[in-house]
Image: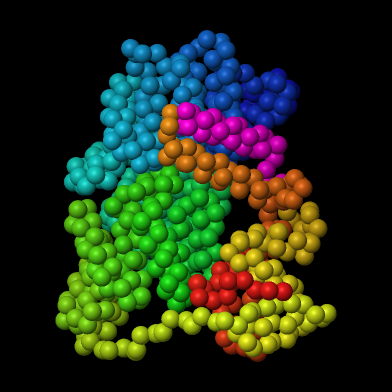
Amino acid sequence: MAGGAPGGLVEAAHAAAAQGDWQRAHELFARADGDGLVAVVDLPVLAEVAYAAGRLDVTIEAWERAHHALAQAGEREPAAGAAVRVAMHLLFDTALMAPVRGWLRRAERFLDDGVETPGHAWYAVVRTYERMLMGDREASRTWARRAVEVGSACDDAAAAIGQVAEARLLILDGDVEQGLGLLDEAGLAAVSGELDPLSTGVVYCELVCALQGLAQYDRAEEWTDAMEQWARTGAVGSLHGRCRVHRAEILRLRGSYDEAEAEVLAAYEELRPYLRRELGWPLTELGRIRLRKGDLDGAEEALVAADHAGWEPHPSLALVWLARGDVTAAGAAIRDALERPSAAPSKELPPDTDLGRAPLLAADVEASVALGDLDRALAAADQLDDVAARYQSEALRAAAAHARGRVLLGGGDGAGAEASFADAERRWHQVGAPYEAALARAALADARPLRAGGAPTEPPRARSAADSIRREGDYWTVVFDGRTVRVRDTKGMRFLARLLAEPGRELHVLDLAGAQAGPAGAGADAGELLDERAKAAYRRRLAEIDEDIDEARAHHDPERAAHAEAERELLVRELARAVGLGGRDRLAGSASERARAGVTRAVRQAIARLGTHDPALGEHLDRTVRTGTYCSYLPDPQGPARWTS
């Protein structure tokens, strides 16, 4: 049998890889590696196989081992290339910039001046995106140009990715026509079939990201179709999942919400073995889809999870709060996001750009009108007009027209509002966005003729009475706004009391449920969330981040240090989720899901029971208690600051 003898394991692994049987190839390589049979020359293939099999940690470790072995052997160019590959995977799949910079520094030490090699071209590619994701577009442009120039001479794949990056930078700078032309040129490299699968997928994904960010949905849909057709046979690693997210974005726009939700949930499962921070991307899309469907609890759960992944959840999360009637919280969140834009690196949406601000500005108009702050709403609408004009996007022009209509309607100008909403409806219809077109039609009905609507709602009154929740034997006594409710003890009441006792704190369901979640290992759990190999990788990443922090401080670069410290916090938080109290490994799979479902059901049942006795109490808790994988009690600004027990 092939691979039966120890000496034949590596040969059999190579054969399985050549046939595209990635799981079999990885299994054989793992056995051979355990027996010490994998040589340095085999490590690049092991890395490729592991990536295709969903083992990003093994991929990165294999390239790390290759770098160290080649460096010791004095093979400078291959050592540099291996270091660049580590940096590339860290950048595209984890978006952890501090470790990326560390590996680029290692590569620099082995890249000889005066020559132009594929290592130089790929170094320029990774440096391009590292600078783009950090918001330094000027330096990113310089590196993109170098990637194209060097890659054109020695590595077509590096040149193609450099060109698509160059196109994205032109678009972000407002040179839309030239940027779109360059995107089309870069796309030819993808459809030519001359690039390797990973590079082909990166070019496709970057094309669609650029067009989605520009709200050029027709062209984005065309390239998504092309990417999807290619992905059926050519995608490896995270690329198929990324393609699914792009497809879900288009399906949401077209109004196919159930299909979009199924697509993005499948994408999330496919991307979990690969992405770290950028898992927030499919989670945010899931939140947007559920918001469209009216599933506010599901939308909030997805968006809070995106936030925990280190992703900016607004304006989508703020719009969920706005839909719930929590106008004050929504307005404050949007203002904060505009005034202190997220610096979280994102290949899908580079930080601190006008294109990134556009959805926030549209949401700011909605919240400000709801708050009665028409001056702020008008300023936001004016800025959105400017963004739409600069980027020549029909969808952005439609959003700007709708925002203008909201301001005019709020100010009592029915004729002006009618014209703006009619313009918005026409443009959304041309874009092919039925939901947005329907919103414009509904607003048009409000403006034709202008109706006064209801009197402004009064702000919630502050209560002076102390609120309390305490257990007395088999019953709980709850005092709210001077009224008393007594209900029988349940698990839901115990969970609720814990949340009320710690306002603002987010508790994982496994911590909240404790022993209620069942014994570890019960059911069909998938095993430890992190095996020893993955934990070792986390330790290496944390050491690299600490090194980057030290260097940033030595160079008096507080912004870079702050970015690295945020990444350190993100990794520590991930480890905390994977490792329970006392350092015990948490189990993946059904335990967490059972706890999430059980805690959510129990808490919601407890709130409903309290609401039957005191509707105001039930309404307050329903609005302020968040359930899901993470649960919390977020009281109203004018509500109770703390419950007593």
Residue 56 vertical position relative to residue 555 in the rendered view, above or below = below
Q: Position of residue 255 (x, y in %)?
A: 38, 68
> On the rendered structure, is 356 left or right of 571?
left
Q: Is residue 538 magenta?
A: yes
Q: Quadrant of the N terminus?
A: top right
What secondary structure is the stretch in magenta mostly built from? helix
Residue occupying image coordinates x 28% and y 52%: 354
Residue 130 vertical position relative to residue 216 in the rendered view, above or below = above
The magenta stretch spans which residues? 527-554
* Residue 506 visible from this viewpoint: yes
> On the rendered structure, is 144 left or right of 416?
right
Residue occupying image coordinates x 77% and y 77%: 471
Relative to the observer, which residue lies in front, 486 or 144?
486
Q: Is residue 41 magenta?
A: no
Relative to the observer, which residue lies in front, 159 or 502?
502
Residue occupying image coordinates x 28% and y 69%: 377
Q: Position of residue 245 (x, y in %)?
A: 44, 54
